[in-house]
Amino acid sequence: MLEFNAHDNICLGNNCRLYDNVCIDKYTFIGDNVIIGYPKEIIIEQLQRECRELGNFDINAAKLDKTIIGESCRIGPNVVIYSGTRIGNSTSIEDFCRIGFDCEIGCKSILLYRAHICDRVRIGNNCRIAGFVCDGASIGNDTTTMGSLVHKYREPEKWGLIEDSPEIGDKVVIGYDAKIVGGLKIGNNSYIGAGAVVTRDVPPRTMVIGINQFASFEDWRGCMKGKYFW
């Protein structure tokens, strides 16, 4: 079931694929080669088992979670959005982004070119997201991240093991190519410098550069351990 009407003023590009149970609100623009409502892996695996047993691979028979695209969104070419994901109003998703299943993205956020958002991710309002965001991560409001949020991946032989995920607060900046590793918390109004590596909790209003080099905003003087940041 695809929910939208011609009078809703939705612009749908060429060669798009909208799977079942997709709802698109009015005034939304969708570029070419976009896929919305793509089935999660467990659904495809179920269909493959049924095909082996019954000889019938019918995606239309699958029950897909509802995928919701809000009002006045902009979705660029070659974007893939998995089933069960909810996109808030006036959010922009640039070319070649990937958004996994059961994600939630707030209003007026921007996903920058080729952002890779894994499954069950929560992103707030007015965010700017680039780079890689691992399964289950949460990002607050008014936050910018241009690095990677990743799991510790301590047991690679147990692929698919659910690990603790990073929790990023409000009004945080994570600079280009910074890496946030494991189930840590980054407090509100913190700034993670470009290329930094963070493996432990960051208090609010804290600057981080290098590998876990912390300084409060009040103590910051533009350098740390002889290395100038600006």
Image (cartoon, rainbow, N blue to C red):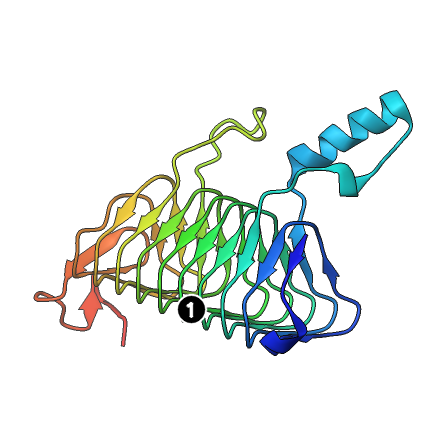
Question: Mark 1 highlights which residue?
Answer: 109
Total count of labels:
1
Image quadrant assignment for residue 188: bottom left
Residue 64: % across, % down = 64, 42
As displayed, is residue 216 above or below residue 6? above
Q: Nearer the viewer, residue 178 or 78?
A: 78
Residue 27 horizontal side relative to residue 200, left or right: right
Dot 1 falls on a residue whose secondary structure is loop
Residue 215 horizontal side relative to residue 23, left or right: left
Q: Residue furthest left?
A: 218
Quadrant where the C terminus is found in the figure? bottom left
Q: Residues within 10 Å of mark 1 (few under 14, many from 20)?
A: many
As displayed, is residue 85 above or below residue 109? above
| Residue at (37% x, 49% y) in the render | 138
Q: Residue furthest right?
A: 55
Q: Residue furthest top?
A: 53
Image quadrant assignment for residue 24: bottom right
| Residue at (44% x, 60% y) in the render | 147
Amino acid tagged 1:
Ser
Image quadrant assignment for residue 89: bottom left
As displayed, is residue 75 above or below residue 147? below
Q: Nearer the viewer, residue 176 or 112?
A: 112
| Residue at (13% x, 66% y) in the render | 217
Residue 132: % across, % down = 51, 55
Q: Nearer the viewer, residue 6 or 61?
A: 6
| Residue at (50% x, 75% y) in the render | 72
Residue 225: % across, % down = 20, 61
